[in-house]
Amino acid sequence: MAGIKSRRLFARAQRAIPGGVNSPVRAFKAVGGTPVFAARGAGAYLFDPDGRRYADFCLSWGPLIFGHARKEIVFAAQAAMKNGTTFGAATEGEMLLAEAIKKAVPSIDLVRLTSSGTEAVFSALRLARAFTGRTLVVKFAGSYHGHVDSLLVGAGSAAATLGLPDSAGVPKAWAKTTIVLPYNDSQAVAGAFAQWGGDIAAVIVEPVAGNMGVVLPEPGFLQALKAQTARHKALLIFDEVITGFRLGLGGAQGLYGIRPDLTCLGKIVGGGFPLAAFGGRRDIMELLAPLGPVYQAGTLSGNPVAVAAGRKCLELLRRGNPYPALDAAARGFVREAEAAAQKAGVPVTINRAASMFTIFFAESPVTNFLQAKRADAKRYGKFFNGLLAAGVYFPPAQFEAAFLSTAHDAWVREQTLKALGRALNAL
Ligand SMILES: *Cc1c(COP(=O)(O)O)cnc(C)c1O
């Protein structure tokens, strides 16, 4: 249960902020209880205003691959800030970050920076529509691509349907521009192209899904998307806002060897600051203003403080190559968690890709959203609150990814596994 200070702050916040939060999942509605407020973070730990410490496996939903307040990143941001916090003019730093992104992700010839993943996604869609002269976009049920109007459809649709809005305020006409298909269903993708091929501008996919909980692409799925889009002259957009710099420097496309036409990046690329990016093939990206007719802009785009943090983060990743160690740590952690669940007699399915994973309270494999939704979200809520009481902060919802950072050393993992075993036993 949240401490007295968090509870007081939450009560007061609700008088000034809708629901007391600036992003809905922070309100703990999916797990019950009062949200823990964050006072500070250090390495693997989050501290609340009551002075309680939590081993943090939510990690701001993905950006913190080095944990909280990694000192080189903080110093880089501080140094940049002293020279001015925003210019609304081109800078050397943003050019260097663009070069670092290009080097890490070879499918990106040209890249533009934005302030959020949502912006990156809707800009990429506008561009794809302009390039192809088509309207429809294919997405997969259970995927999240930011709160882009036309993509707020299809949480849970298993059939190939033209979308209905999931959010009030999204015109039906916009939702209808989205075709929602089940994740990992290559057949459905072929069917959609057979039916609407000439009207499909793009397929957008999380190449490893993170927003229905972690769901891995089955062998051949991403290849089928590449083949279908190429054949029908539609674009393939990889939404690597989570997976970019998480699964490796080259993201999921590096890991699976697929070259998308456009890529969206966010989270890690900003080093914990509001920064995201979209990029890809030169002939497509050159349609952007000022070169071409597709308008896209931002007062704080390429913000120098965020850029400095992002550059330092990518530099640390390149120099330190923490990926093999992170993968091994996560593999061991998940194996132990599975053993603990078995010992407690609690059926779970744990999906993992590198240092991102989800513990589904489900018996059978989870390869799409329909299967994910069979997981016992109530049970997850109990598990979450058991962990929280023991000083472990997991994502406050079943259908989300948990993350490890380089700061989650053997001690943190071991202590967490003990708490996890107790939380499972108490279910
Ligand atoms: C987080 C996320 C987004 C949205 O990014 P914001 O910075 O929150 O706007 C888009 N796509 C995916 C896959 C994400 O996980």
Image: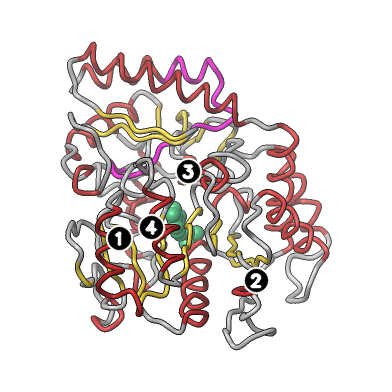
Q: In the picture, which quadrant includes the C terminus?
A: top left
The residue depicted at 34 percent of the width and 55 percent of the height is 143
The residue where tag 1 is placed is 189
The residue where tag 2 is placed is 300
Secondary structure beneath dot 2 equals loop
The residue depicted at 16 percent of the width and 41 percent of the height is 374
Give the CA separation, mark 4 to mark 1.
37 Å
User: Which label's residue is closer to the chain start, 3 or 1?
Assistant: 3
Mark drawn on residue 38: 3
Pointers 2 and 3 in contact (CB under 8 A)?
no
Report if residue 214 is visible in the image.
no
What is the residue that sits farthest to the top in this orientation?
Answer: 343
The residue where tag 4 is placed is 21
Name the one closer to the observer, 71 or 115. 115
Query: Of circles 2 and 1, which is in front?
Result: 1
Residue 19 position in % (x across, y down) = 31, 60
Residue 418 position in % (x across, y down) = 37, 14
Q: Is residue 59 left or right of residue 200?
A: right
Does 98 sit above or below residue 161?
Answer: above
Q: Is residue 215 left or right of residue 284?
A: left
Query: Of circles 4 and 1, which is in front?
Result: 1
Q: Give the residues in magenta.
A: 397-416
Residue 99 lies within the magenta run = no
The amino acid on which the numbered mark 4 sits, given as a three-letter code, is Val
